[in-house]
Amino acid sequence: MWKTELVFVPFPRIGHVVSMVEYPQYAKAALCQACYGSLRLARTLEQKAAELLEAIPKPFLSLHLRFEPDMVAYSQCEYSGLSPASIEAIEAARGDRKPWTGELARVWRKRGKCPFTPNETAFVLQALSIPTNTNMYLAAGDGLVEIEGLKPTYTNVVTKSALLRGEDLLNMHGNTRAALDYYVLINSDSYVATFFRNMDKMVAAMRAYEGLHNTLFLGRRAYVEMTSKGLDGKELLQALWVAHKEDFSMGRGSALPDCFCETVISLYFLLYMI
């Protein structure tokens, strides 16, 4: 009868290992792939996440939309045309972090530091010819504002709060809810992110590791550059399409490049070499 034996191999800190040239490529690749391959949710959480994934109409696009009050406050960006309720929520979240003004605000926005609003997101998605009847899973934090800017255009939008029982979410910590989103994002047919922070980098990296190609980060810098030139309507739609059309890729730039050599290295090979 077979016996299962766990073997633990000590390594220095991961960030140091992948960057040190004295380690051969196969060792760096095997370590990196082993780390991605070993990532798991807790069993009960993975079961709940699988329930959520099963409930989403297929095929579907997952959209990670970051326009919560604390996110907007953190960005130090200011927006015109928001509802009074949204403005109140954002101002309450700002605290001492005041928005940039004048030339600093313009430079900050041109650098792509300001999150897309839901309305801007819908416009860019239309520029990319994503059908308005697309099944879409919306991943977002608590208190997402201005969602009415997206839903009238993309009508088949679902969220975890709509698909799971209220008591399930009520008892979950914010990080646990984010883990549910993570599971859905890495398993979706297509993935679109409106910002580029740790969650998005991890999702893109895991999708690249799993060989899922349809991953896209919307170009905030390109959007600001084009609108500042006065482009609008069909002209802006065409320019946004040109700016994004080459970006449906593996998302490798978001992951550790040493993970993606031509041959997938087996961890067992690494253990054998040691």
Image (cartoon, rainbow, N blue to C red):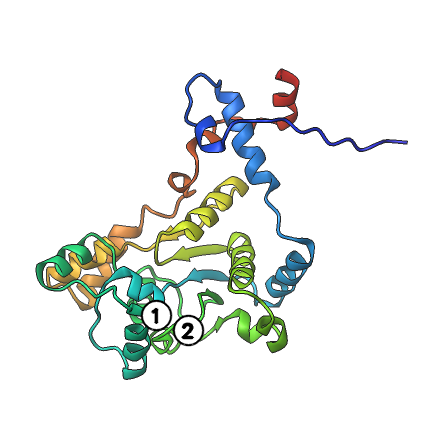
Q: Residues within 10 Å of mark 1 (few under 14, many from 20)?
A: many
Q: Amino acid at mark 2?
A: Gly
- Report if residue 67 is visible in the image: no
Q: Amino acid at mark 1?
A: Pro
Residue 207: x and y in percent read 50, 46
Residue situated in front as seen by the camera: 78 or 117? 78
Secondary structure at numbered mark 2:
loop
Above/below status of 154 relative to 13: below
Residue 70: x and y in percent read 35, 66
Task: Give the distance between the C-alpha atoms of the residues marked 2 and 1, in whole angstroms.
Answer: 7 Å
Instruction: Return the mark for residue 143.
Output: 2
Residue 153, located in which quarter of the rendered image?
Answer: bottom left
Residue placed at 25% from the left, 56% from the top?
A: 113
Residue situated in front as seen by the camera: 82 or 135? 82
Of the 4 image quadrants, the one containing the N terminus is top right
Whether the residues at callouts 2 and 1 have beta carbons within 8 Å, the answer is: yes
Above/below status of 192 relative to 85: above
Above/below status of 18 relative to 92: above
Q: In this rendering, would 22 be left or right of 44?
A: left
Q: In this rendering, would 124 be left or right of 158?
A: left
Residue 260: x and y in percent read 47, 32
What is the residue that sits farthest to the right in this orientation? 1
Instruction: Give the mark nearer the N terminus: 2 vs 1.
Output: 1
Residue placed at 49% from the left, 27% from the top?
A: 262
Instruction: Return the mark for residue 117.
Output: none
Look at mark 1 in the image and give the residue it sits on. 69
Residue situated in front as seen by the camera: 96 or 39? 96
Secondary structure at numbered mark 1:
helix
Residue 257: x and y in percent read 42, 32
- Report if residue 178 is visible in the image: yes
